[in-house]
């Protein structure tokens, strides 16, 4: 029987109070739409929390990466509270710290600098998706 | 968050999987920052559900409006689960249908053609804020 190829599920916090929540969301879209469209997917974090059966199955059967905007790590904590084993977790503020010349602005929609920073973060996370996928294949 | 003044908490589902989730997020921010900055506060749904004490306390004590991107009503259900029934539960597809508008086709970077949909949701949230405060 052919083994079904797994996807890496990327869950951002999408926090609405700070720019780094918007950066988490944009980084996720960059990752799943441009950088790794064939191996990474996203789903609604809130659906997981209300116990949506389809979403729970998705994160049960596939490895999960969380991307949070701040050290409160709401995406990671929310996923773990639902029994998800988070393979890797990141905070977008760290991408900004590594690229201090790119200060993102805009909470509902990121400015151009924020979008560029999200693209850089997603490029870096593409390798993480590959690593997690390989680890999953070995299981 | 100032708990001394009666305000309305706005809770967006911000669903990542659907354009309507992005509409919800953008529209809520517009109401919070542009239309009703003195009457509303943002309640960050991920923080709320991850155990944010202040958010949960606020939502127990003050009225809330939830804005969901689909019929699964994650924001409304989460609010009810952790604090109490929202004063109003808005659903983006219902608002768009009422105004005969279509949802954007993509998840982000909305264009000019999508602004009418966002504005319809913004107006509905702002109207709900006024109604909730009048009745509170």
Image: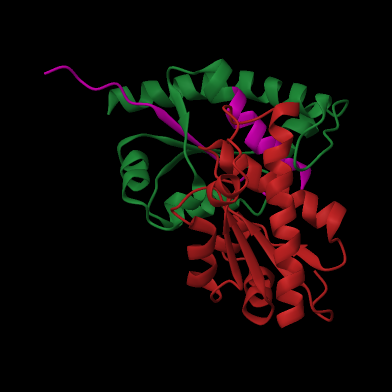
Q: In this orientation, does residue A92 appear?
A: no
Between residues A40 and B24, which one lies in front from this camera angle? B24
| Image quadrant in which the N terminus of chain A is located | top left
The residue sitting at 49% across, 44% down in the picture is A44
The residue sitting at 57% across, 24% down in the picture is A31
Question: Which x, y percent locates residue A32?
Answer: 52, 24
Vertical placement of residue B114 versus A85, above or below = above
Question: Which x, y percent locates residue A135?
Answer: 37, 25
The residue sitting at 80% across, 56% down in the picture is B32
**Magenta segment range?**
A1-30
Question: Which x, y percent locates residue B14?
Answer: 60, 47
Q: Is residue B97 magenta?
A: no
Question: Which x, y percent locates residue B64?
Answer: 65, 70
- When asked about the image quadrant of residue A50, the answer is bottom left
- Its colouring scheme is by chain
Between residues B2 and A124, which one lies in front from this camera angle? B2
The residue sitting at 82% across, 24% down in the picture is A112
Vertical placement of residue B1 versus A102, above or below = below
Palette colour of chain B: red
Between residues A128 and B1, which one lies in front from this camera angle? B1
Palette colour of chain A: green
- When asked about the image quadrant of residue A26, the answer is top right
Q: In this orientation, does residue A50 appear?
A: yes
- Looking at the image, how many numbered discs can be counted on the residues? 0
**Left or right: where A23 falls relative to B93:** right
- Furthest residue toward left: A1
| Image quadrant in which the C terminus of chain A is located | top left
**Left or right: where A135 falls relative to B81:** left
Q: Is residue A16 magenta?
A: yes
**Left or right: where A131 falls relative to B42:** left
Vertical placement of residue A43 versus A117, above or below = below
């Amino acid at each position: 029987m052919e083994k079904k190829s797994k996807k890496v599920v990327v869950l951002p916090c999408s926090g609405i109070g700070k720019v780094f929540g918007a950066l988490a969301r944009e980084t996720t879209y960059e990752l799943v739409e441009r950088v790794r469209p064939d191996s990474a997917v996203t789903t609604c974090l809130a659906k997981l929390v209300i116990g949506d059966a389809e979403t729970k199955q998705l994160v049960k059967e596939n490895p999960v990466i969380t991307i949070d905007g701040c050290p409160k790590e709401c995406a990671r904590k929310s996923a773990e509270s639902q029994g998800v084993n988070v393979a890797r977790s990141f905070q977008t503020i760290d991408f900004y710290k590594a690229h201090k010349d790119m200060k993102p602005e805009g909470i509902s929609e990121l400015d151009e600098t924020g979008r560029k920073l999200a693209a850089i973060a997603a490029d870096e996370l593409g390798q993480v998706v590959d690593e997690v996928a390989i680890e999953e294949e070995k299981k | 968050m100032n708990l001394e003044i009666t305000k309305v908490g706005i809770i967006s589902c911000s669903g990542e999987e659907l354009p309507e989730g992005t509409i919800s997020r953008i529209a809520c921010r517009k109401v919070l920052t542009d239309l009703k900055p003195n009457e509303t506060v943002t309640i960050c749904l991920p923080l709320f559900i991850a155990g944010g004490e202040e958010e949960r306390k606020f939502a127990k004590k003050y009225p809330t409006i939830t804005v969901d991107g689909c019929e699964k009503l994650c924001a409304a259900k989460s609010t009810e689960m952790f604090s109490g029934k929202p004063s109003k539960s808005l659903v983006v597809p219902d608002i768009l249908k009422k105004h005969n508008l279509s949802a954007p086709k993509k998840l982000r970077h909305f264009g000019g053609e999508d602004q009418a949909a966002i504005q319809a949701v913004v107006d509905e949230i702002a109207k709900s804020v006024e109604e909730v405060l009048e009745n509170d």
